[in-house]
């Protein structure tokens, strides 16, 4: 019970972070969970918790969700999760994080790169890669944030829409783990505490986000995305 309560508090903190800037909380949580859970439970428990965190954040900011981007993202996600889950045991994904990290950095800082890549960027393609690769790669969330960062100026639109898209990614991932037979009920007590912490953190983060002005928010988000991209690239070589 004490460990479950501690995990609930940790999830509250990470969900609050994500509620303020739109991402980062999930990566903090996945880095902490190995100290508390067996390896086979890490990704499924993290996925279900993040599904709750993201969908609750989208609900709290539903007026800002840009629903027009959802259909293409969902279609891409369905194709991505179907393809990757069927061939996951036959392909090497060792260097995928490297390409994700490089793409994020170039997309954020290179105008020339953006001019050339713009014709290929779409929510369908982002959905395909973010959701499909989420089964094995922990850093796909910044893909969505990078595109939203360029498409929308308003911070609440960016965070709320990203939450909806990442929630879709995680719910598809959870369905895959259920299909492969992961017993979520074995961790029901832990999950209840973490889910409550995730929802409360989303609410707190949504309220705290209003304290940050738009320009400062975009600067924080750009720096945070860059740091996460660098971390992903470095992790490939370590």
Image (spheres, grey):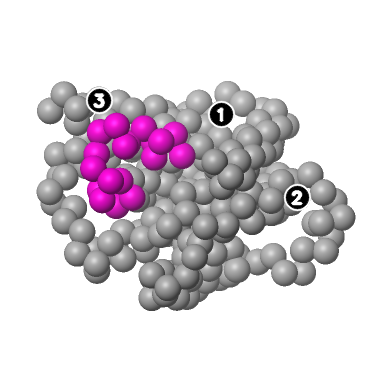
Mark 1, residue position: 210
**Residue 219 figure quarter:** top right
Position above or below: 33 against 43: above
Q: Which of marks 1 and 3 is nearer the N terminus?
A: 3
In the rendered structure, the answer to whether residue 234 lies left or right of residue 184 reads right
Pointer 1 and pointer 3: residues touching (CB < 8 Å)? no
Camera-side residue of 5 and 37:
37
Measured from the top left, where is residue 43 in percent x and y? Answer: 33, 50
Q: Nearer the viewer, mark 1 or mark 3?
A: 3
Q: Is residue 39 magenta?
A: yes
For the record, the magenta segment spans 27-44
Disc 2 secondary structure class: helix
Disc 1 secondary structure class: loop
Camera-side residue of 204 and 117:
117
In the rendered structure, the answer to whether residue 86 lies left or right of residue 108 reads left
Q: Distance from label 2 to label 1 (Cα)?
A: 29 Å
Which residue is drawn at the image coordinates 28% and 62% (left, top)?
177
Q: Nearer the viewer, mark 3 or mark 2?
A: 2
On the rendered image, what quadrant is the N terminus found in?
A: top left
In the rendered structure, the answer to whether residue 95 lies left or right of residue 9 reads right
On the rendered image, what quadrant is the C terminus found in?
A: top right
Measured from the top left, where is residue 212 in percent x and y? Answer: 61, 26
Measured from the top left, where is residue 115 in percent x and y? Answer: 84, 60
Mark 3, residue position: 6
Q: Which of marks 3 and 2 is nearer the N terminus?
A: 3
Mark 2, residue position: 106
């Amino acid at each position: 019970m004490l460990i479950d309560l501690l995990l609930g508090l940790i999830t509250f903190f990470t969900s609050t972070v994500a509620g303020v800037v739109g991402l980062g909380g999930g990566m903090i949580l996945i880095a902490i969970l190995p100290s508390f859970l067996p390896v086979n439970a890490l990704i499924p428990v993290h996925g279900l918790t993040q599904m709750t965190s993201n969908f609750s954040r989208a609900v709290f900011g539903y007026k800002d969700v840009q629903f027009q981007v959802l259909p293409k993202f969902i279609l891409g996600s369905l194709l991505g999760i179907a393809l990757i889950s069927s061939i996951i045991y036959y392909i090497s994904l060792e260097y995928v994080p490297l390409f994700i990290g490089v793409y994020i950095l170039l997309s954020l800082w290179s105008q020339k790169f953006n001019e050339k890549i713009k014709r290929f960027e779409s929510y369908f393609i982002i959905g395909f890669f973010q959701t499909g690769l989420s089964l094995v790669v922990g850093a796909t969330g910044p893909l969505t944030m990078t595109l939203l960062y360029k498409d929308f100026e308003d911070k609440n639109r960016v965070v709320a829409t990203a939450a909806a898209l990442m929630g879709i990614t995680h719910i598809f991932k959870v369905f895959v783990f259920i299909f492969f037979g992961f017993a979520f009920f074995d961790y029901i007590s832990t999950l209840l505490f973490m889910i409550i912490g995730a929802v409360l953190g989303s609410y707190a983060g949504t309220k705290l986000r209003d304290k940050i002005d738009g320009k400062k928010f975009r600067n924080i988000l750009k720096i945070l995305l860059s740091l996460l991209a660098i971390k992903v690239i470095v992790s490939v070589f370590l």
